[in-house]
């Protein structure tokens, strides 16, 4: 999978995707990857639906989430905490 520029195209509304964020609130630029979705033409985070972008924080690229694993193999020494 490759990153898709938000200038090239946007994901389907309300589809969770990986988003690449440029943040200039601190000294210089920082870049982060988070999960987000589009609703009403605004990027939002999936937990509370808060808007991600503002004047200093911009989503530059996005990418579909990968498929979930089909099987999960736990280490042989794995023990579940049963409290």
Image (spheres, rainbow, N blue to C red):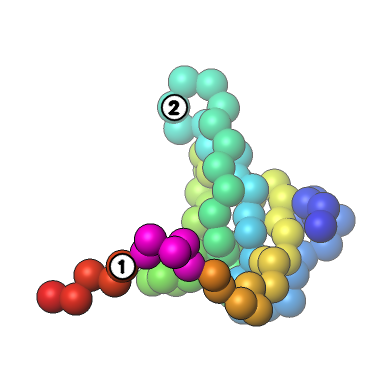
Mark 2 highlights which residue? 26
Main SS of the magenta segment? loop
Disc 2 crowd rating (10 Å Cα; few below 14, some 14-19, many 20+) is few
Where is mark 1, residue-wise? 79
Residue 73, above or below 27 = below
Q: Which of the 4 image quadrants contains residue 68?
A: bottom right
Where disc 1 sits, the SS reads: loop
Q: Is residue 6 rendered to the left or right of residue 72? A: right
Q: Residue at x 71, y 56 (%)?
A: 62
| Residue 38 found in image quarter | bottom right
The residue at the point 67 percent across, 66 percent down is: 65
Marked residue nearer the N-terminal end (2 or 1): 2
Residue 73 position within the rendered picture, expressed as x and y whole percent measured from the top left:
54, 70
Identified at 19% across, 76% down, the residue is 82
The region drawn magenta spans 74-78
- Quarter holding the C terminus is bottom left
Q: Quadrant of the N terminus?
A: bottom right
Element at label 2? loop
Q: Residue 6, how many percent across, how many down? A: 76, 55
Answer whether residue 57 is visible to the viewer in this image: yes
Q: Magenta stretch: residue 36 in it?
A: no
């Amino acid at each position: 999978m490759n990153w898709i520029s938000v200038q090239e195209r946007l994901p389907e509304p309300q589809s969770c995707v990986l988003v690449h964020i440029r943040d200039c609130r601190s000294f210089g630029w920082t870049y982060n990857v988070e999960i987000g979705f589009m609703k009403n033409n605004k990027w939002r985070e999936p937990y509370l639906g808060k808007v991600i972008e503002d004047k200093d924080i911009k989503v530059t690229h996005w990418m579909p989430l990968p498929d979930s694993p089909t099987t999960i193999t736990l280490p042989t020494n794995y023990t579940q905490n049963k409290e």
